[in-house]
Image (tube, coloured by chain):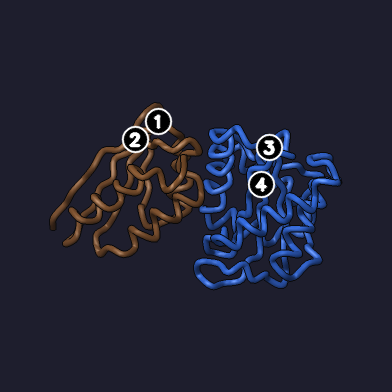
Chain colours: A brown, B blue
Amino acid sequence: MPTASRDIVVSNTLGLHARPAMQFVDLANQFESRVTVFKGGEEPAEADGKSVMQMIILAATEGTPLRIEAEGPDAETAVEKLAGLFESKFGEE
Amino acid sequence: MKLNEFILKDAIVPELRATDRDGVIRELVESLAAAGALPPPAVDEVVAALIKRETNGSTGFGKGVAVPHVKHAKVKQMAGTIGRSTTGVDFAALDHQPVYSVVLLLSPENQPQQHLQAMNAVFNNLQQDTFRRFLRQSDSREKIAELLDEADQGK
């Protein structure tokens, strides 16, 4: 099964709060691939990228390093699009 | 972060009177104001902000729970409360199921990290089947407060 991953850093001031978490999950659900998000830094954790609750539990603040991993037929496109959300700061500051 | 660091036990509503989303939000904000978390004149403004936030995207993330929350200038210190509905409330939840437990959180504007930590504490517990079940069964303020104490102690 194809896999792909991308390292990003949370760059919006408010961090990965509920709205961006939902935006991420909405997009992740459009892909067939399994999506997992790993949090680095002092308190490592991982979340199912298709679960809003798990994504919120990451409590990823501004500056937190995250790795987005996808496994499935559309893995490459999934990580690219999902990383793009962080790059655009979810439309925030 | 512990639940007891921001959930005001005095503001817990074990039997919500309201049966619709906006009514539940108002009831919980009024309860927080009565417990001293918010100046009473700010209630209308905060309720409106919460409803707007909820309309933009439901915080009913499934499994019978909703977590309406807002960052607001009138809130000086983070404060939350819990409301329990026996009838179930339509929160336009992601799984289209009624909501029986509502955790409402008010945060000041400039503390995004603290807000994320509080949401982390809330969902760490709400994600657990046993916590959700006990919360739904706790029919008094004391029982809910006890459940929060146990959750904070990691029982």
Residue position for label 1: A63
Q: Residue A41's image quarter?
A: top left
**Which circle, 1 or 3, is nearer the viewer?**
1
Q: Residue B55's image quarter?
A: bottom right
Q: How far is disc 4 from disc 2 in space, using C-alphas?
A: 27 Å
Is the residue marked by circle 2 packed among few (<14), some (14-19), or many (20+) residues within 10 Å? some
Q: Is residue B36 above or below residue B25?
A: above
Q: Residue at x 45, y 55 (%)?
A: A22
**Which circle, 3 or 2, is nearer the viewer?**
2
Mark 4 near mark 1, Cβ–Cβ under 8 Å?
A: no
Q: B13 and B34: which one is in front?
A: B34
Mark 3 near mark 2, Cβ–Cβ under 8 Å?
A: no
Chain ID, mark 2: A
Element type at mark 3: loop
Element type at mark 4: strand
Q: B37 and A93: which one is in front?
A: A93
